[in-house]
Structures are given as structure tokens and as C-alpha cells.
Amino acid sequence: MGDEPVIVVGVKQVPDDDEVRIDPDTGHLDRASAPAVMNPPDRNALEAALGLRDDAGGTVVAVTMGPPTATDVLEEAVAIGCDDAALITDRAFAGSDTWPTSLTLAAAAESLGADVFVCGEETTDSSTGQVPPGIAAHLGWAQLTYAEELDPEFDDETLVARRDVEGGHEVVAAELPVVVAVAYGEFEPRPAGLHRKLYAESEFEPIELSAEDIGLDDDEVGIDASPTEVGGMETVEPVERERVVVEGVDELADELAETEVFG
Amino acid sequence: MTETAPETDTDGSTDRIDLTDRDTATPDYDDAFDAVVVGAGLAGSTAALTMADEGLDVLLVERGRYPGAKNVFGGVLYTPTLRQLVDVDAAPLERYIAERRFGMLSDEDETAVSISPGEWHDPPHNDSYTVLRGEFDEWLAEQAVEAGATLVTRTTVTGLLREGDRVVGIETDRPDGTIRAPYVVLAEGGNSLVSEGADLKEKDRRENVAVGVKEVLEFPEREHAIEDRFRLTGDAGVSYHYFGEGAVGDAFGGGFIYTNGDTVSVGLAYRLSDAATSQPDPEGTLNAFKTHPAVAPLLRGARTVEYTAKTIPEGGADEIPELVHDGAVIVGDAAGLVLNNGLHLEGTNMAVESGYHAANAVASAAQRGRTDADALAAYREDLESSFVVENLERYEWLIERVQADRELLFEELPRAVADAGSEYFRMDRAPKDQHASTAKRELLRAVGGYTGAAKLAVRYRKLLS
Ligand SMILES: Cc1cc2nc3c(=O)[nH]c(=O)nc-3n(C[C@H](O)[C@H](O)[C@H](O)COP(=O)(O)OP(=O)(O)OC[C@H]3O[C@@H](n4cnc5c(N)ncnc54)[C@H](O)[C@@H]3O)c2cc1C
Ligand SMILES: Cc1cc2nc3c(=O)[nH]c(=O)nc-3n(C[C@H](O)[C@H](O)[C@H](O)COP(=O)(O)OP(=O)(O)OC[C@H]3O[C@@H](n4cnc5c(N)ncnc54)[C@H](O)[C@@H]3O)c2cc1C
């Protein structure tokens, strides 16, 4: 770690769930017409990253891998308080699944000299949750997933996290550098300050990085580097459940006895 | 624990990206803008657009997620002034108004007058179009931004900054949320908490406010329901206004149906004081209106996709607050500029007109380097000599009259007219002469005989003068 920690936070643009219309006739979701917004769990990631800076100082840089229109979420991140933001964009990225996506973010983290890479729990559009562990795997870093609380002990090159685990929580200390995926809903995001928001929306320009800029070859990313194969899509029809309306407990007992649930 | 360096898939030798020479510190925007506009509705966006065209740096502040996100109106947008400022034909319009119909509803009857002049089919279509405010307001704000204004959304103005009596900026709900500017244009609409909070206007009295409720309905099963039911072709549309107890029950106000592209807007507007007393349930009143025998067939098979409610100022010319202050002007609904008298429900044209005149006054004051109220007085003068104040004054008496005669006009007369109509056209074996005189007798009885009718005619003669 240099003198000042560099905290990178990954944000992604997704279709706005509030605006995803359900076609009342077919019951299908119409995502295509929904406007793009910041993936809601990434707001928690931003807050966690800014909280680390509040406690330990340093620089927070938002990154997104996506098309130029994804600049909007970077402006939002800067409005909320990030010091800077980078758009990682390249035609070569088209068709990337979680493998090359996390490789790209890993390479960006390295280029930016990140000590901590904070992510959301998962996205609301693909929701694999594979990207944060993927980044850690590509870089050989430690990872802290489902983090509910963070305690930077950067002087000791350590980040301590309280993790949500089944049946309770555990407290884990990881050596830097580290990837963090914060639990969705934890780290209540702060509102953007007025002057910062004006700056972010009207004057700020993100750093733009291509695959080459972060040391990736075109054949390491994109559809050809994506192991995922979509085998097919099926719409599952719900199974009609049998229903019987009974009056009173006795009748219920009789019914159950008859169906041999119990005797 | 193994101490071998972890394996990485990235090329660690790539150049580090240097962040140190990036300057991303937050600038101070105090007095960076010449004017701040509160509210990106019709009045606000028009003011922002006009000031930007005049070369001013303008900040337009809107509390919604986007301009128009929650804005409610009937509605028919009237565009005579807007057409001078923007390319109205490029705007998201629904239909032009090709027919206006006025229906008097008693409990069960309707007596209606309809007008559809041929020229309304030709551009500029009498400058009357149905629009959906969510789309239109967003578009208009975009025009202001294209002219050079800066728009900031999701930001609620909570107060004004003062230096003595002078308004010198705004306060918002955001952290670090104040911003100073020489001029503030208050375009916050009818619920004008900022102007009231800063004592720039008094709170509207209940009698001077109407409550508006509106539903947007679609016809899921019928592709041409709107064209067929309202007898329309192409982009033509209708504006139907209704009065009488069949429309708003025991209240002072009226109902409306407007056709959009694939939906219809159905709603009511009546006095808030009635909503507090004789006609308490606007939603129930709207449901009764929708099921009136003259209305229900128009809406058969329709499904509600949106329900909204909002207040409408309707105090008339007497209730217009002081429009200019040191460092601030009030425009649109915030200044009570709505004509709502049963015949007309017009606020959009007045919002645009006032925003336009206010913006010009600010631009000219800015050129002279002055922010005092006197330097902005041109706004008040221009508005007073425009149709806005002229119309509000002209119809002031009408609202008072109608209010005084409400029982006669909205209950007795509709019933009498319907009865007289059915008597006049009655099919039986009595001669028509006899039907005609019975009909006449019934009408006369309702208005209080020949003297009553003459008095009524005198009282309302200004309608045609
Ligand atoms: C079966 C399948 C097939 C797919 N096919 C394609 C395809 O053909 N073409 C295509 O473009 N996409 C495709 N995708 C989508 C794409 O793989 C994912 O959107 C992307 O890899 C991120 O994965 P995720 O959304 O599941 O992220 P998650 O792992 O759920 O995200 C967790 C966190 O990682 C961070 N993060 C994730 N993505 C980004 C990003 N882009 N920038 C910055 N931070 C980020 C955020 O902090 C986020 O909260 C496919 C997805 C699946 C599941
Ligand atoms: C039910 C109904 C039907 C109507 N029908 C018609 C019709 O058919 N034809 C017609 O011409 N007129 C009609 N009107 C009147 C018309 O809607 C108004 O006159 C017109 O919208 C006024 O425009 P405005 O810009 O002054 O205010 P608004 O359109 O109310 O815009 C005010 C804007 O300011 C924003 N705002 C408010 N407070 C703040 C704050 N503190 N900080 C930041 N932003 C704020 C709001 O979000 C909004 O965007 C109708 C009104 C109603 C309620």
C-alpha cells in the first residue's frame, strides 16, 4: 500500500426495476424500455467505500465496465462523493460474461493501484454475484463477501469485516489488498451534496480506459473469452395447486386423513 | 501458510494510471448562476429557456426524479406562446382538440352542446393539444437545457436565502444545499410552500382552491375504442366538459374527459371548501361521474392505469400575490394564474406566458445590474396587459355569479332543461305546440318566470359581450 489507500468501487448500470413494466396482457416483463439506473446494491458499496475513506482517508474511485452511456452512473457516484471515476469501455468487451467482466475489473484495479475493491452483493439484472469473487480470483486477493460492517486497520494492512453468515455473523480480518462485496441493504447510502452533484452532472468527465490501457488483449475479453453457453430458454408455467375449502377443524382433520397426510 | 506469491491473470507490468493530476475538487457554485428557477413545470422550464436564450446562466431545480414525473393536469395544453419559443410540432403531443363539448348533467340526464369547427383540423389546431405531462414536461425541460440551462433533479427547494428583504438564493434538502444567485424565479406550482414560507405570498384560502382528481384509462380489449367512441380519425381528439350535480354532486366545479393517443383522461375539479363539507369524497365523486349514464358508455371496458390528485388555485385576479420582489418573481400556478370557471380550465397557457414575461424582466434587470423589485416591475406590467390578467379579470364576475347561482345553474336548470327537452321532443298524440308550451313553462318556472329569465340574461350578458 502507498501512503494513501486507493479504494476502487464497482458500479453497474441496470434497467430500473421500478420502471420495468409488466405487460398486463401477457404477464411478461418488458425490461428493454426501462431507463438505466445504478444497480441498487452498488449504492451500498459506494457508501461502504466512502465510509472507509471517512475513517482512514485515501481516494475513492468508481469504475464501471460498460458502454459510454454508463457514464451516468459514474456521475452519480462522483455526486455522492467519489473522488474520481473511470469508464472502462471497449468494443472488444461485447458479449462478456462474468469471467471476462471480472478479469477486466481486476486489471482496472491493478492499473489504478487499488488496495481495496468494493462491490455490491449482486446486480439486479444478471444477479450472479460472481464478479466480486471473480476479481479476487483473477488477482489472487483475499475476499470479504456479505460484509455488514467494515473496520479499516490499514496501518496494519488489514481490513476487518463483519460478515452475514447463516444463523448469525462472523468477524474476519483480511490482509490488503482485498475485494469486498457488501451485503445488500447494509451501509445506508448518503445523499449527494448539491454543489458536488452540480459538478458531477455538468462538468466532471470520467477517465476512459480501453482494454489495452489496462493491459488486456482483445482475445482475453468479450464473447470468445466467455465460457458461458446459453443452452436455451424455457418459460415455466406454474403448476395449478389443488384446493379444498373446509369449514372447521374437524372437517380439516377428515380431509387430511383422507389424503393420507396423516391418519 | 504458504508464502508463494499468488497467481494472477492480469498483466501486472501495465503502467499505473496516474490520478494525481486530475482535478476533481468540488467548485463553489455560489453566484455562478445568474438565476435559479424553482420547479421544472411549464412556467419554470419556459422561464429557464427564455433566460438561457437571453444569454443568462440558469439553474433549474426540480424535486421530481425527472421533470413532469409527478405533474398532474387534465389535460389540454394551450400553446399560443409556447409556439413562439419552441418547435411545438416536435414535442410529445397526444392529440389536437377537434371537438369541444359541454354537457349539463342532472342525476340521469344530459343536455349538451358540441362545437367542432373545421379549421381546428388544420395546423396550428387552435393551439390546443392533449399531452401527458410526464413526457411533455421532460421534453420542455430538455429544450431549456439545450438552450444552455443546467437542470438538477431530485432536489427539493426548502427555503430562500435572504439578505434583509432581498432574496439572494435558495436552500435545498441536500447536504451543502444552499446556493446563492442574484435572481430566483418561483415556479413551484399551486402548492407553493417556498413562496409562502418566505412570506412572498399568503396561503390560499380554501374557497380559492379547487381539488382536482384524475384517472388515466386504457382500453385493453379494443384497439380502436377511442376513435370509435369519440368519432375520431387520425390525430384528432376531444375535450368534453361536464357541469351539474351529475358531474360533481353537491359541489362547485365540473368534470372532464380528454382523449390521449391510446388512453383517456377522466377527472373532476371542485372547490376545496366543498370537499371539506358538502362533497367530501373526491374519489367517490369521480366514480359516480364515471358511472353516470351519459358517461359510462364512453368508458365501457376501460381499465384505470393511473390515479392522481392535486390542488388548483382559482382565486382569480383578486388573489394574485405581489408578483415581483427584491431578487425574486413568482410565476404560473404559484402566482394563482389559473382560469377555472366551468367553461374554461386553463392554466398551462398562463404558466407559459408568465414564465416568459418574468424571464424577460429578469434578463433586462440583469443587463442593468439591478435586482430590486422596481427593476423587475416590467414582469407585472407585461402580465397585466397580456391575456392572462385580462382573462382572469374578465371572468372574475362570472365565478362570483355562478357561485351565487350555483343551485339554480347546477341543479335546477340542468333538470329543467332536460325535462323541457324531453317534453319538447315527446312522441305522443298531443300536438307539438302543446309540448313546446309545456317545455317553455317548465324552463321558465326553473328560472323564475320572464322576469327571472330577463334578470339571468342581464346577469350573464358579459359572457357574450
Ligand atoms: C448466462 C448469462 C449469459 C450472459 N450473456 C451475456 C452476453 O452475451 N453479453 C453481455 O453483455 N452480458 C451477458 N451477461 C451479463 C454479464 O455477464 C453480466 O452482467 C456481468 O458479467 C456482471 O455479472 P453480474 O451482473 O451477475 O454481476 P454480479 O456478480 O451479480 O455483480 C456483483 C457486483 O460486481 C460489480 N460489478 C458487476 N458488473 C460490473 C461492471 N460491469 N462494472 C463495474 N462493476 C460491476 C458490482 O459492484 C456488482 O454489485 C450474461 C449473464 C449470464 C448470467
Ligand atoms: C386535475 C387538473 C386538471 C387540469 N386541467 C388543465 C387543462 O386541461 N388545461 C390547462 O391549461 N390547465 C389545466 N390545469 C391547470 C394546469 O395544470 C396548471 O395551471 C399548470 O400545470 C401550471 O404550471 P406550473 O408550471 O405553474 O406548475 P406545475 O405544473 O405544478 O409545476 C410545478 C413544478 O415545480 C416542482 N416543484 C414544486 N415544489 C418544488 C420545490 N419545493 N422544489 C423543487 N421543485 C418543486 C414540481 O415538481 C413541478 O414540476 C389542470 C390542473 C389540474 C390539477
Image (spheres, coloured by chain):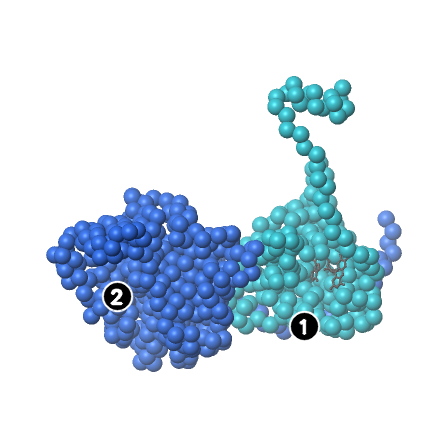
The reply, left or right, for residue A197 in relation to residue B207 is: right
Residue found at the far left of this picture: B451
The residue lying toward the viewer, choosing from B134 and A105, is: B134
Both labels 2 and 1 in a single chain: no
What residue do we see at 76% from left, 66% from top? A95
What residue do we see at 24% from left, 64% from top? B395
Residue assigned mark 2: B392
Q: Does the residue labelled 2 lie within 8 Å of ligand 2?
A: no
Residue assigned mark 1: A208
What residue do we see at 42% from left, 56% from top? B266
Q: Identify the chain drawn in blue.
A: B
Residue B235, given in percent of the width and then of the height, sits at 48, 70
The reply, left or right, for residue B208 in relation to residue A227 is: left
The residue lying toward the viewer, choosing from A257 and B86, is: A257
Q: Identify the chain drawn in cyan.
A: A
Q: Is mark 1 on a helix, strand or loop?
A: strand
Q: Quadrant of residue B364?
A: bottom left
Within 10 angstroms of label 2, few (less than 14), some, or many (20 or more) residues? many
Exactly how many numbered labels are in the figure?
2
Amino acid on which disc 1 is placed? Glu
